[in-house]
């Protein structure tokens, strides 16, 4: 299977990339690691007129400390995310979830920003970004804007990125206090996408759960926060019973799809079970 | 057409390629590096794994133009002067293959794994090669081969596993 012909641009700066996108014609695709785009181009489900390849834009790579946040360049590869010391210190949930993405070859090419901008409902990183209250820094020819995670994911494979815009970096606010984190993923075989997965962050205070943030993967066309669970985990005793009771709310407000991997009601069941497991680990129980 | 300059298995090449040409097709059809095979065409099987600037990638999921200015190593470039790479030798000695179609990719992925983790456990080998599928399901001996090679590559001794046949 060979992709349809396209014009190829390989910019080396963000400005060059924005220019290349602007002048690429009607149907331009921005390629990050290409690990989702190239497969769909091979199948000719996508046949862009122009591909703008970001792999040589060095300023989009790397992780830096910015005081109250860490900032992850959109083109930082999954491999680099997994071994990054700042992520390990401030947001180990990202590394834990990234380790479950695809396989090591794909993780060498695939990028953090690419996975978020692709916004596949079964992708692992959108729910993680949502649970961490990440902020998305978007560049256009007119300047930059910042979009909170809650507004970035709009619909199935659709984000707040407008035509001609580029996701340049993702800000992860540092969390004050003592937080435990866990990503609980359910799939059947190696490399497989999540059937359902749950990202849990739990702040504990002297044996009690003070607050929790729960992100759900593949429980609707976008990643979701399990707000019913979060409400049930405000200032409660950190016990198996209280966590199990809270997890019963995990499917509220979700709209999972039915497909070959599972029916919607099965996904609703999984969301509750996986939320209980994820919160249990994150709370250190 | 776009001109690329690339080093493959230690030799330099300058070629014109269409941007849509996949790296694996460039390697096989323009350079004759047919040791790297196409298994699935869907980015799943890993048979086409090569090293791009020292890291394992699926060459069916990289465009040849993206290798411009880079160093590519294929299964054909890892032996030296007729001496098999320790990973090749281990796959041979531990019977880490049946039909052999997945083997080039298995070996390239396994070398990448051992570069990161010089002493992988059973589970770490299995996780490490999750991007490579063996349709003969001969994983047991593949895991043994990777561990034997890991020991040799790090200068230690091989784990105390006997070289069992495919029946194990």
Image (spheres, rainbow, N blue to C red):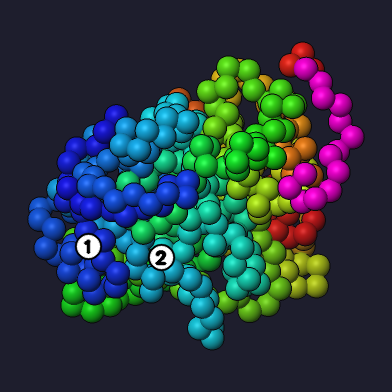
Which residue is rendered at x = 77% and y = 51% of the image?
Answer: B154
Residue at x 66% of width, y 54% of height: B116
Q: Specify whether B155 is left or right of B96.
A: right
**Mark found first going from the N terminus, 2 or 1:** 2
Q: Which residue is mark 1?
A: A162
Which is the main secondary structure of the residues drawn in magenta?
Answer: loop
Judge from the rendering whether residue B143 lies leftward or rightward of residue B128; answer left or right.
Answer: right
Residue B159 colored magenta?
yes
Mark linked to residue A88: none
Where disc 1 sits, the SS reads loop
Q: Residues within 10 Å of mark 2 (few under 14, many from 20)?
A: many
Q: Residue at x 77, y 59 (%)?
A: A284
Residue that appears at 22% across and 59% down: A9
Q: Give the chain of mark 2.
A: A
Specify start and end residues of the magenta stretch as a single range: B152-165
Point out residue A74 in the picture as x, y percentages from the top left corner.
40, 65
User: Is residue B136 shown to the viewer in this render?
Assistant: yes
Q: Which mark is residue A74?
A: 2
Nearest to the observer: residue B139 or residue A263: B139
Rendered position, B150 above or below B32? below
Question: Helix or strand or loop: what does disc 2 sit on?
Answer: loop
Residue A150 visible in the displayed image: no
């Amino acid at each position: 299977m060979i992709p349809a012909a396209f014009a190829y641009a390989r910019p080396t700066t963000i400005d060059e990339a924005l220019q290349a996108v602007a002048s690429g014609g009607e149907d331009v695709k921005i390629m990050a690691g290409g690990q989702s785009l190239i497969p769909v181009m091979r199948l000719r489900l996508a046949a862009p007129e122009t591909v703008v390849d970001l792999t040589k834009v060095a300023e989009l790579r790397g992780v830096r400390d910015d005081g109250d946040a860490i900032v992850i360049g959109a083109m930082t590869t999954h491999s680099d995310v997994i071994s990054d010391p700042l992520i390990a210190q401030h947001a180990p949930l990202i590394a834990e979830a990234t380790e479950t993405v695809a396989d090591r070859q794909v993780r060498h090419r695939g990028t953090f920003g690419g996975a978020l901008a692709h916004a596949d409902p079964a992708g692992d990183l959108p729910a993680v970004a949502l649970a961490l209250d990440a902020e998305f820094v978007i560049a256009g020819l007119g300047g930059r804007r910042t979009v909170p995670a809650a507004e970035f994911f709009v619909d199935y494979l659709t984000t707040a990125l407008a035509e001609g815009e580029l996701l340049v970096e993702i800000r992860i606010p540092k969390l004050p206090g003592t937080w435990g984190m866990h990503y609980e993923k359910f799939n059947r075989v190696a490399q497989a996408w999540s059937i359902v997965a749950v990202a849990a962050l739990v702040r504990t205070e002297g044996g009690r759960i003070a607050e929790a943030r729960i992100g759900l993967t593949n429980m609707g066309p976008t990643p979701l926060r399990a707000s019913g669970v979060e409400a049930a985990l405000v200032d409660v005793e950190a016990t198996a019973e209280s966590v199990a009771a809270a997890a019963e709310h995990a499917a509220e407000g979700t709209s999972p799809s039915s497909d070959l991997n599972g029916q919607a009601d099965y996904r609703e069941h999984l969301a509750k079970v996986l939320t209980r497991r994820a919160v249990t680990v994150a709370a250190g129980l | 057409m776009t001109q690329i300059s690339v080093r493959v298995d230690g030799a330099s090449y300058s070629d014109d390629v269409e941007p849509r040409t996949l790296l694996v097709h460039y390697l096989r059809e323009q350079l004759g590096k047919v040791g790297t095979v196409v298994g699935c065409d869907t980015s799943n099987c890993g048979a086409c794994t090569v090293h791009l600037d020292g890291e394992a990638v699926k060459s069916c999921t990289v465009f040849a133009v993206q290798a411009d200015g880079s160093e590519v190593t294929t299964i054909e470039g890892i032996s030296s002067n007729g001496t098999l790479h320790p990973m090749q030798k281990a796959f041979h000695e531990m019977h880490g293959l049946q039909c052999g179609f997945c083997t080039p990719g298995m070996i390239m992925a396994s070398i990448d794994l051992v570069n990161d983790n010089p002493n992988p456990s059973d589970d770490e080998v299995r996780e490490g090669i999750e991007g490579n599928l063996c349709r003969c399901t001969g994983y047991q001996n593949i895991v043994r081969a990777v561990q034997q090679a890991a020991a040799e590559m790090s200068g230690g001794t091989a784990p105390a596993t006997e070289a069992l046949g495919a029946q194990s």
